Amino acid sequence: MLPFPTAPLLLRCLAGWATGLLIATLAAPVSAESDFFPRLQTALPKHFPDSHSSGLSVTELTPPPELPLTIDLTLHQTDLWDRLRHGFAMMDLNDELVLHYQQWYMNRPEALRRMIERSRPYLHHIVEELEARGMPSELALLPMVESSFNPMAHSPAAASGLWQFIPATGKRFKLEQNWWQDERRDVIASTSAALDYLQTIYDMHGDWHLALASYNWGEGAVKRAIEKNEARGLPTDYPNLTMPKETRHYVPKLQALKNIIGDPQTFARLNLPFIPNRTYLATVAAPRPMDVKTAARLANMTQDEFRHLNPSHNRPIIKPHTPVVLPADRVDTFTENLANHGSSLTQWQAYAVKSAERLAEIAARFGISTNELAQANGLPGNVRLAAGSKLLVPGAGENAEGLQRMLHADGSLAIIQPEPKARGKKQLKGKGNQGKNTAKGSRIASKGKAASGKKPAAKAAAKPKARNKRR
């Protein structure tokens, strides 16, 4: 039996064994395909730069900043775009259509700048409304897709305004549409209605992409598409639904704009306009009827500037207690000028048509062009008005009682009287020719009678009916 080695001897044996193993390892050839340290080989470059006598350069790698778990919306920001980016909350969509529209917008920077300039008066209000409701701030970009931020936009499907409400959906969300005003074009009212609608369809689907598809296509159509996929065992998210081309491209357009505006470097490279983060719009109402022209003058604005913020008015008069949208810095001016304005606020009055007459005759009587009078009353042109019709005509505060009655009516009080039938004129002309026994007339009459008896007369009587139908 061998004696058990002492501790010093054991340590010397172990050290010798380790040294021998290290020498053998260093002496062995290393294969190029060695997978001994795969992670290390992946991380290090194959060739290192030559070292200098000064030693290797050292670069300090700093960790990325930690993002806060919550966003402090009370933090004041001077740039509205920064505030908008902080509120992005929708799940991103990444597909070829998004890339297509992103490139499409970036290739047209001038058009993108013009659209953003048009958004300047409205965007701050929309962002504030979204924040107050806890909704994703990228929805503030939706009017870029819908109307290019043109409040007077009108589609072939009769959609109107920044948010492109069709008449039925506008009525559903309490937007007034009458002879005096169309609130689908009202910036404040339509924004509130649009966000109500978007929240309603989001609550229905629980998905913002499906809510946007419903906004474009209709919630009923999206629901049926979802049910069809469910029946086939297919996914029911936005990318997998069968939908019209317009709806398929709808969300990618919004995502492309979000990508461009959400990237400060791209935003700066395209030289897109800065918008300050401050209140732009305010509303004020007058207790008396007031002309659009007068309201603009009281606010020290041009008529075009005023109409740009108040595009909902169909008539030249604003009804009493109707909110007027003004730049926030013009409210005090407007209020002061209104208080000091002693005379009538309108230059229009009511006029009752006593007997049938054409619009041109009335226009000449009041010193206004036919086109201006037709536009003021929403008429198609030089129509013939029946007795009892009511019109807006120029007149400084005259017939105030009649104007008040008109202001309480929701529709036009003008009654268009049909034109006299053309058949009567032909009959008179025919009677005038009776008794003239010209050779030409006799030949035509005899020829017609011999060929078809009374049929030519029947055809002549049928023609005026066709013309009347087209009228």
Image (tube, rainbow, N blue to C red):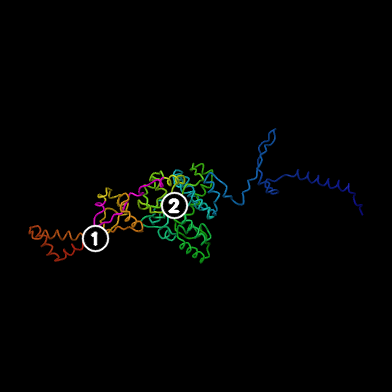
Q: Is residue 105 above or below residue 437?
A: above
Q: Secondary structure at mark 1?
A: helix
Query: Does the magenta run of residues contain 341?
Result: yes
Mark 1: which amino acid?
A: Asn
Residue 108 in view here: no
Q: Position of residue 9 (x, y in %)?
A: 88, 47
Q: Is residue 326 above or below residue 247?
A: above
Q: Position of residue 260 (x, y in %)?
A: 51, 47
Identify residue for label 1: 468
450 displayed left or right of 362: left
- How many residues crowd mark 2 within 10 Å: few (<14), some (14–19), many (20+)? many
Mark 2: which amino acid?
A: Val
The quadrant the N terminus occupies is bottom right
393 displayed left or right of 296: left
Q: Secondary structure at mark 2?
A: helix
Q: Position of residue 466 (x, y in %)?
A: 23, 61
Residue placed furthest toward the top: 53
Q: Closest to the observer: 198 or 441? A: 198
375 displayed left or right of 93: left
Q: Position of residue 269 (x, y in %)?
A: 51, 41
**Chain part drawn in magenta:** 337-362
Q: Residue at x 32, y 49 (%)?
A: 396
Per the rendering, the mark at residue 187 is 2
Query: Does the magenta run of residues contain 2?
Result: no
